[in-house]
Image (cartoon, grey):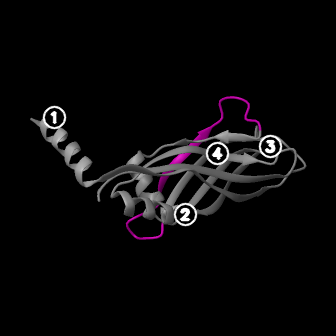
Amino acid sequence: MSRAINFLGVILCSLIGCVDGTARAPDMCNVTPVGKVPAVALPGVSFKPVTFSTKADFSDVFEKIDSITGGLDIVITRFSFDGSSNLDWVSSIDVSVKGNTPDLPPVAFGSYRRSETAGDSVAMTVSMSAEEAKRYLSHSLTMTYTVSGTAPTEEVTVTNTLCVDASGEFHKSL
C-alpha cells in the first residue's frame, strides 16, 4: 500500500513539478585564538590548570538551512586544540559550553587526555550527543577550556578549531 502511495506521489510530482534536494554547508570552521601559555624557567613542572574562554557562533548558517529544509543535521568534523609548537606538555583539556540563553546552561562539551605524543595539534573528543550539540551550536555560545599539564619549554600560542558540516533535506512542490 505504501509503495502505491509513494509511486502515486512520484507520478504527481512528475506532472505538476517537484524539487527534492539538500541544503548543505560543508565544513564550516570556527578557528579562534585561545591564548598564550608562557614558558617558565623550570619547564616540565606541573602547573595549576589554566582556563581560557572563546566564542563560537554557527547560528546564522544553521537558521538559513533550517528555514529552507525544516530540519537540520550536523556532524562535527573537526574539534582540535592547536599550538604554535609542540603540545606534548598538555596532559588534559576539558571543554564546556554555555549558551547565550538561560535554557543553555554550562555543560561538558568535550575533552582530551594525552595517550601518546601530541605534536602541534590534539584532536578532542565531543562528549555530548549529536542532538544536544546541535541545540547548543544553533546559538551563540562561550566555550571554556581548562588545560592541565606541565610547563612548556617555550611560549605557545594556542587556537581552537571547531568544524561542522550542516545539512538538511527538502521536498518542494512547484
Nearer the observer, disc 3 or disc 1?
1
Quadrant of the frame with the C terminus: bottom left
Residue at far front of view: 15
- The residue under label 1 is 3
Q: Within 10 angstroms of label 4, few (less than 14), some, or many (20 or more) residues?
A: some
Please report whichever mark, 2 or 1, sits nearer to the chain's N-terminal start: 1
**Image-based side of 6 in relation to 107, left or right:** left
Whether pointer 3 and pointer 1 mark residues with C-beta atoms closer than 8 Å, the reply is no
Which residue is labeled 4 in the image?
80
Mark closest to the chain's N terminus, 4 or 2: 2
On the image, the x and y values in percent for residue 115 come to 65, 30
Give the spatial CA distance, label 1 vs label 4. Answer: 46 Å
Dot 2, how many residues are within 10 Å of its Cα: few (below 14), some (14-19), or many (20+)?
some
Residue 118 inside the magenta-drawn segment: yes
Amino acid, disc 4: Ser
Q: Is residue 15 magenta?
A: no
Q: Which-is-in-front pick, marks 1 and 4?
A: 1
The disc label shown at residue 105, or none: none
Tell me if I can see residue 59 in this picture.
yes
Mark nearer the viewer, 2 or 3: 2
Amino acid of disc 2? Asp
Q: Residue at x 43, y 54 (%)?
A: 134
